[in-house]
């Protein structure tokens, strides 16, 4: 166990933004890792915003969504903005049906729009 | 609890195999042998039986409707002869069942009523029984033969009824789909601007359809603005308002701003009196206003060309 088979999400910096593209199955360990990595990276790089690309995510349950939300809230506390890009239509309608709290989130359809949105925020 | 977009279920035909069907109708090899035996003396006189049956059909109102054309009548009569020859062969295989399903579908599609079909099969059953009784068999064997024939007649009728059911279900499914598409006409009125006029009554099913249609359309067109016009919605109540607000929030997750237009004075009063919190949802009274504002946000402008 431990670091040996730990799945982590690669973080890249582009245009002064941290881009995290989630392309693996979401588990609580993955979220935990993402949270640690992302906040550490934000602290050391002083990036102005974070883009979480979820276009590769087809299934997300209520708990996953809430964990994602709490990461976004943490980023906000650290003074940066977060934009989610590439949410799938089926996923959104399911989230809304479950009465998930989607208020105050910034989201775009693709990565290009996400960079534009970050600049506006 | 995984979240995947719902799939639309389609109509399924009953796919029971010949073996299962035979078992279901309790048709044993003994019965099939008996039917084969009946066939040996019945086949030469099937012509007469079919003729007799048409005498019966001639008295029904449906006769004129479906068989007024001589050619059609001849064709159908030939088909019927073929059918009874297959029937009396004493074999129920996959091919036989398949042909029955096609027959059933044809009957249902031309709109022949199930009552007449049922009655017709019943008459055939009786004609066969009568014919068996005229033969020199002992009473017990006659009864067994009639029984075997009845079983197979029931099996055939059952398959045809199933197909009637299938055809009408298919029709309903088609209508549902058409209705759904008609009730959610999301159109791209300008590059990046979607418009959906809602007319009639909004309930939870419809609002879900609207949301799915809109989200899919946003994904397709990469739209940045969505206008939901509710001037045609008959009644606004708390439930409807909440649905609409949910839709506007959902589109935001795809990077698309929503505006609800068509809030008439009456609607505005109802919403406030009901204490509905519209929150951050953009609303306008006319569709024109909404389009105008959407254009402005997208840095677009329509100007008059002076000639």
Image: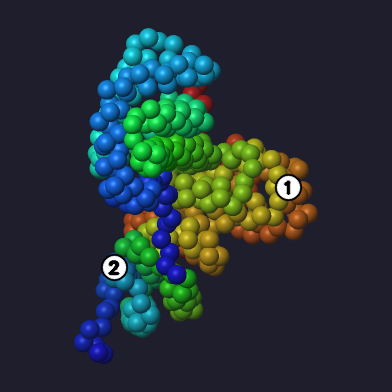
- Name the residue at 26% across, 79% down: A7
Q: Quadrant of the N terminus of chain B?
A: bottom left
As drawn, the residue found furthest toward the bottom would be A2
Location of residue B146 in the rendering, given as x and y in whole percent from the top left corner: 39, 38
Location of residue A87 in the rendering, given as x and y in whole percent from the top left corner: 40, 60
Residue B239 falls left or right of residue A77 = right
Judging from the image, mark 2 belongs to the subunit labelled A
- Name the residue at 34% across, 64% down: A57
Q: Which mark is residue A53?
A: none
Residue B269 falls left or right of residue B29 = right
- Name the residue at 32% across, 17% down: B75
Judging from the image, mark 1 belongs to the subunit labelled B
In the picture of the structure, the residue carrying the numbered disc 2 is A23
SS category of the residue bearing label 1 = helix
Closer to the camera, B304 or B144?
Answer: B144
In the picture of the structure, the residue carrying the numbered disc 1 is B268
Location of residue B164 in the rendering, given as x and y in whole percent from the top left corner: 44, 36
Q: Identify the image quadrant of residue A26.
A: bottom left
Q: Mark 1 and mark 2: span between their CA atoms?
A: 45 Å
SS category of the residue bearing label 2 = loop
């Amino acid at each position: 166990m431990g670091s040996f088979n730990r799945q982590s999400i690669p973080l890249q910096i582009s245009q002064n933004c941290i881009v995290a593209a989630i392309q693996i199955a979401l588990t609580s360990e993955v979220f935990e890792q993402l949270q640690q990595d992302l906040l550490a990276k934000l602290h050391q790089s002083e990036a102005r915003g974070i883009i979480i690309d979820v276009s590769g995510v087809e299934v997300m349950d209520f708990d996953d969504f809430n964990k994602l939300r709490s990461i976004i809230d943490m980023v906000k506390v650290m003074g940066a903005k977060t934009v989610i890009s590439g949410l799938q239509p089926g996923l959104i309608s399911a989230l809304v049906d479950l009465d998930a709290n989607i208020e105050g989130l910034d989201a775009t359809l693709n990565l290009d729009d996400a960079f534009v949105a970050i600049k506006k925020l | 609890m995984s979240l995947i977009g719902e799939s639309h279920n389609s109509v399924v035909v009953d796919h029971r195999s010949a073996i299962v069907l035979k078992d279901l109708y309790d048709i044993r090899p003994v019965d099939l042998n008996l039917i084969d035996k009946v066939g040996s003396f019945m086949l030469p006189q099937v012509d007469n039986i079919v003729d007799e049956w048409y005498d019966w059909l001639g008295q029904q109102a449906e006769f004129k409707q479906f068989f007024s054309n001589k050619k059609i009548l001849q064709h159908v009569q030939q088909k019927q002869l073929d059918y009874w020859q297959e029937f009396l062969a004493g074999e129920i295989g996959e091919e036989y069942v398949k042909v029955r399903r096609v027959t059933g579908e044809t009957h249902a599609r031309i709109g022949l009523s199930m009552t007449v079909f049922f009655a017709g099969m019943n008459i055939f059953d009786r004609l066969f029984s009568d014919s068996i009784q005229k033969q020199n068999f002992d009473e017990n064997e006659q009864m067994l033969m009639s029984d075997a024939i009845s079983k197979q007649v029931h099996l055939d009728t059952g398959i045809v009824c199933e197909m009637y059911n299938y055809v009408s279900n298919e029709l309903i499914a088609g209508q549902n789909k058409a209705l759904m598409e008609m009730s959610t006409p999301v159109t791209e009125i300008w590059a990046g601007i979607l418009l959906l006029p809602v007319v009639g009554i909004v309930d939870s099913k419809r609002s879900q359809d609207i949301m799915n249609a809109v989200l899919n359309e946003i994904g397709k067109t990469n739209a940045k603005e969505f206008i939901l016009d509710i001037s045609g919605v008959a009644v606004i109540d708390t439930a409807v308002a909440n649905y609409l607000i949910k839709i506007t929030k959902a589109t935001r997750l795809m990077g698309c701003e929503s505006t609800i237009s068509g809030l008439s004075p009456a609607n505005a009063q109802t919403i406030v009196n009901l204490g509905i919190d519209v929150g951050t949802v953009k609303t306008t009274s006319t569709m024109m206003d909404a389009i105008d504002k959407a254009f402005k946000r997208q840095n677009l402008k329509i100007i008059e060309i002076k000639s």
